[in-house]
Amino acid sequence: MFSDFSRDERIFSFIILGGLVVAGLAMAIAGRGDLLSTHGWLIFGLSLLAFFAAVRQFDRPEPSAERLSEYYDAPTRAGLVLTLIWGVIGMGVGFWVAALLAWPDLTFDVAWLSFGRLRPVHTSGVIFGFGGNALIATSFHVLQRTTRARLPDAISPWFVLLGYNLFCIVAASGYLMGLTQSKEYAEPEWYADIWLVVVWVVYFAIYMRTLARRKEPHIYVANWYYMAFILVVAILHIVNNLAVPVSFGSAKSYSLFAGVQDAMTQWWYGHNAVAFFLTAGFLGMMYYYLPKRANRPIFSYRMSIISFWGITFMYMWAGSHHLHYTALPHWVQTLGMAFSVVLLVPSWASAGNALLTLNGAWHKVRDDAVLRFMALAAIFYGITTFEGSFMAIRAVNSLSHYTDWTIGHVHAGALGWVAMITFGSLYSLVPSMFKRERIYSNKLVEMHFWLALAGTVIYVFAMWNSGVIQGLMWRTYDEAGTLSYSFLESLDAMHPYYIIRAFGGLLFLLGAITALFNVVMTIRMPAMEATPDRGRDLPAEPALQAGE
Amino acid sequence: MPFDHDTVVGFSKSFGLIYLVVLSLICLAWTYWPSNKKGFDEAARVPVLDEEDRPWR
């Protein structure tokens, strides 16, 4: 990594890391006696280590000018590995909290092992750690290939990737210590939020600067989705996290919003995190890697544009369907419901577009597990968006809300769509990124596919069953007009499904571990030999590879 | 006029409605404008083009 930096960039990286060392120390001192100081010391320690590592490499020879005629893929390579590491952590914790729900005694009376603290480690670990790193890594790759331009400089992509992972570490460690602002998917406290804004602005700037240098006049649709993801997540993150810290020496802050406004802002954020983090970004991934892998242009480019604008216009208004039957004004609930139903159109346009692209190439889907991951992702995307529109209808929501049905829906999306498209893109990307001829083992990819599919189906069916039973038990009345079942009875009815769900999650986790193993073994394979007739995928000079 | 709930509702139901409908119409017209088709067809080929794997000059 450091050998790719020019002299100016090396000095600039000292300034950034030095600034972080000082900021960490300031947090540690100002926050003494508060959990803020723990995070201060963590940031201080990590950035000091990075600072020394950078200083030791300062005298390395400067990169040659030839690098500018290559794409800059080192951050993508690191991002791909980080994606899988976070995937295993996030899914591992997910399996553990699923087991906790079935066997609550597993907390062993340790505070940080309790469900409340581990659950956000799971959600943030998979959404931000796994999903976020995958989005950053693939977006750098897609951006360069579709604009035919190299990233504008070497330092800012590393700043985004590593800065983002610092945010993830601060977030996850904070949850374990009990730090949370108790907003779903926005749990990190004010200082982590401010840091993420800085990282995110640099991320958006990379996109803008590369687009400004593009050699391809048309901006390919995948970039639109990635840009919508970056821009909207910035807006959502800033607005939902507007808060006043108790003091600069305290980790605790109070939200600017209160009561129903707080709920509305939170679910405007929460649903659009699903829309723009877990959908738009991954659609960008799909619109590039699926045609690339199938070697067929997207079925209808026009349809991809319509679905893009449909999704960006309509998703913004759908969040209030999370607040049916609450103090939120009725018309706002109806607005969210109506937009959620109409959203089915652009969602199915995307899912259909992907499947119609594969139409005529089903033999490739049969033979190639990587393409099958992507095809399955498109199918699950179609299923989940249909289910989501349906569940947003007030009458359906009265049965599904607060039950495991919601959990089943989320995981049909997260496992079936987000993770499948990620694994598919990742497998198709890893060999060329690491200059290897092929993936280490196609059999392991095949095994991963079936583990992932079985895990998802088991998980989702368990939660559908459990959720509907739960919802029905909560609304069954006897002749006297009193509830037929106590809450505890509904809990007993859940127990077998929780065990099945944990098993499904375990299968999915095993698949992710298989992927990590397969990718690590691919990286350890000997590099592809330089053959002049191999036009694409030029092997890099050894000096360029030294960074990993 | 006080800035209250009714103001926000009125704004959403007038300006918000027009904004969404007009933008949708612009988007649809642009996408399906016959002379734009060629550009879109070329753009669709971007991921599958077998160009060498390095930036263009």
Image (spheres, coloured by chain):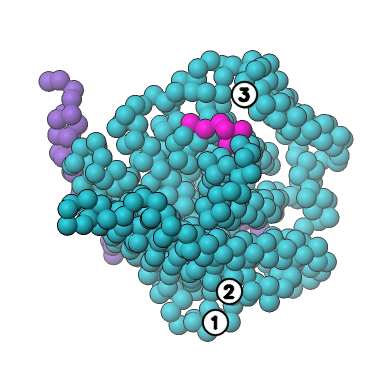
Left of A318 or right of it: where is A334?
left
Q: Position of residue A540 (x, y in %)?
A: 77, 58
Q: Position of residue A293 (x, y in %)?
A: 56, 71
Q: Residues within 10 Å of mark 2 (few under 14, many from 20)?
A: some
Quick one: which chain is purple? B
Residue A500 visible here: yes
Left of A83 or right of it: where is B39?
left
Assign a secondary structure to mark 1.
helix
Q: Quadrant of residue A532?
A: bottom right
Q: Is residue B9 above or below residue A385?
A: above
For the N terminus of chain A, give its image quadrant.
top right
In the rendered structure, which disc, 2 or 1, sits on the residue that comes first in sequence? 1
In the rendered structure, which disc, 2 or 3, sits on the residue that comes first in sequence? 3
Write down the region rendered in magenta: A174-181
Q: Amino acid at mark 3?
A: Leu
Query: Would residue B39 be counted in the magenta stretch?
Result: no
Q: CA distance from mark 2 to mark 3?
A: 44 Å
Assign a secondary structure to mark 2.
helix
Q: CA distance from mark 1 to mark 3?
A: 53 Å
Which chain contains the residue that carries disc 1? Answer: A
Question: Circles 2 and 1: CB distance less than 8 Å?
Answer: no
Assign a secondary structure to mark 3.
helix
Q: Residue at x 47, y 59 (%)?
A: A495
Quick one: which chain is cyan? A
Q: CA distance from mark 2 to mark 1?
A: 13 Å
Q: Residue at x 45, y 82 (%)?
A: A360
Residue placed under numbered mark 2 in the picture: A450
Disc number at residue A74? none
Residue placed under numbered mark 1 in the picture: A366
Left of B9 or right of it: where is A227?
right
Q: Is residue A132 above or below residue A288?
A: above
